[in-house]
Image: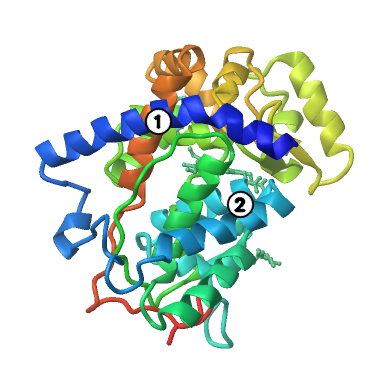
């Protein structure tokens, strides 16, 4: 019943979103399919058209099945894709398990409770049965994140495919992830290193409309009585932390819905992480936050464009990567 209603409610939005993707597509044709550096190694929308025509559908079915059972995994998948792309490019390095000679990214304290590995594994198993050795884990993760955005009520968009899986995953590389203690200048700088504008950084941060952070990620704000936070909100955080370092707090009131409420929490000075609130504190980004808080369609449009760009960060070609047989191990 609830599902039927959800589907029904989605129809007008899908039409709107399809219209937006059409505009986006036209824009891409005009600009010659420039996807960061992705185009150089031949990332394309129809990469699996001949070699594995049902790849997209198989991933989508697996994501939908998993999210029906546990809607909170949407956040996990999107975050995992972000961490993957910011370290060594989108090459599924985040999925590799540690070995006896190597401690992988996922075992860093900065893995920050990544979730959703099983979803990728089951999709991969099905894909290997249908078209062995064809669909990379990096593509599966990028598609799964995209499907998770849509499943949660966010924009629908198409991503180019053809990424190869990397062979390196080192715990020390996670230093390249942004810290929740960063201010806006530091966030702008770090995202700038990956080619993003301040506006794109603010749009991508809107992924925090989904999911939770654990006390350990915001405890310093409580201890230091962070003046950028509303004082009642700080009390809420303090109460959460009284349940321990792993106690969870949602980023906004609707932790499983992809919407623009995240930006509205920033206006109320109730941003969960210091780095979230920093986007409203800084005059460099405040107006962008105001814009997204007022206009969800604008947020959705900028978010999908920034996600397509993020999903094409430093993809590897066949000389530098492979199609893993098992997403947790190099071949
Ligand atoms: C702007 C810089 C960013 C910082 C400093 C940051 C930091 C964090 C931290 C500290 C957490 C909580 C981890 C925990 O306590 O378990 C978190 C959660 C999350 N992040 Fe970010 N993040 C940033 C950008 C992004 C981006 C660009 C995305 C995706 C496009 C993203 C997606 C998520 C999601 C979905 C969650 C919730 C995960 C869950 O509920 O399992 N974040 N982030
Ligand atoms: C994250 O890293 C910690 C060690 O810092 C480890 O205990 C935990 O299993 C890792 N989580 C995942 C999902 O790999
Ligand atoms: C942001 O943080 C950096 C590093 O701690 C500091 O040098 C800078 O002054 C801060 N910027 C603002 C605007 O607070």
Q: Quadrant of ligand 3?
A: top left
Image coordinates for residue 285, horizontal then vertical, percent: 40, 20
Camera-nearest residue between 193 and 90: 90
Camera-nearest residue between 7 and 165: 7
Does residue 104 appear anywhere in the picture? Answer: yes
- Residue occupying the point 40% across, 18% down: 288
Relative side of 215 to 304, left or right: right
Eyeballing the image, is 271 above or below 267? below
Q: Secondary structure at mark 2?
A: helix
Tell me the quarter of the image containing the C terminus.
bottom left
Distance of label 1 from label 2 (alpha carbons) = 23 Å
Of the numbered discs in the image, which one, if any, rests on residue 17? 1
Choose top left, top right, bottom left or bottom right for residue 263: top right
User: Assess mark 2: CB under 8 A from ligand 1?
Assistant: yes
* Badge 1: residue crowd in 10 Å (few <14, some 14–19, many ≥20): some
- Residue occupying the point 48% across, 27% down: 13
Does residue 198 appear anywhere in the picture? Answer: no
Camera-nearest residue between 275 and 196: 196
């Amino acid at each position: 019943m609830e599902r039927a209603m959800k589907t029904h409610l989605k129809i007008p939005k899908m039409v709107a979103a399809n219209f937006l993707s059409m505009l986006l597509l036209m824009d891409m044709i005009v600009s010659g399919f420039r996807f960061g550096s992705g185009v150089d190694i031949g990332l394309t929308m129809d990469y699996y058209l001949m070699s594995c025509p049902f790849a997209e559908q198989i991933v989508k079915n697996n994501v939908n099945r998993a999210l029906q059972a546990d809607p909170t995994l949407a956040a996990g998948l999107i975050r995992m894709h972000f961490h993957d792309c910011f370290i060594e490019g989108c090459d599924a390095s985040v999925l590799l398990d540690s070995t006896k000679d190597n401690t992988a990214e996922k075992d860093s304290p900065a893995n920050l409770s990544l979730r959703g590995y099983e979803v990728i594994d089951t999709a991969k198993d099905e894909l290997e049965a249908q078209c062995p050795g064809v669909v990379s884990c990096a593509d599966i993760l990028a598609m799964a994140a995209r499907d998770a955005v849509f499943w949660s009520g966010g924009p629908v968009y198409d991503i180019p495919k053809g990424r190869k899986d990397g062979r390196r995953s080192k715990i020390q590389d996670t230093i390249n992830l942004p810290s929740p203690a960063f201010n806006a200048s530091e966030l702008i700088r770090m995202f700038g290193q990956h080619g993003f504008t301040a506006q794109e950084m603010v749009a991508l941060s809107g992924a925090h409309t989904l999911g939770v952070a654990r006390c350990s990620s915001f405890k310093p704000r409580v201890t230091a009585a962070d003046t950028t936070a509303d004082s009642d909100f700080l009390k809420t955080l303090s109460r959460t932390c009284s349940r321990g370092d792993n106690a969870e707090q949602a980023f906004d009131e609707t932790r499983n819905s992809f919407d623009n409420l995240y930006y509205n929490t920033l206006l109320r000075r109730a941003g969960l992480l210091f780095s979230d609130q920093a986007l409203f504190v800084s005059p460099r980004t405040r107006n962008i936050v105001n814009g997204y808080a007022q206009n969800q369609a604008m947020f959705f449009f900028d978010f999908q464009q920034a996600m397509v760009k993020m999903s094409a960060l430093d993809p590897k070609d066949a000389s530098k990567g492979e199609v893993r047989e098992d997403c947790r191990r190099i071949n």
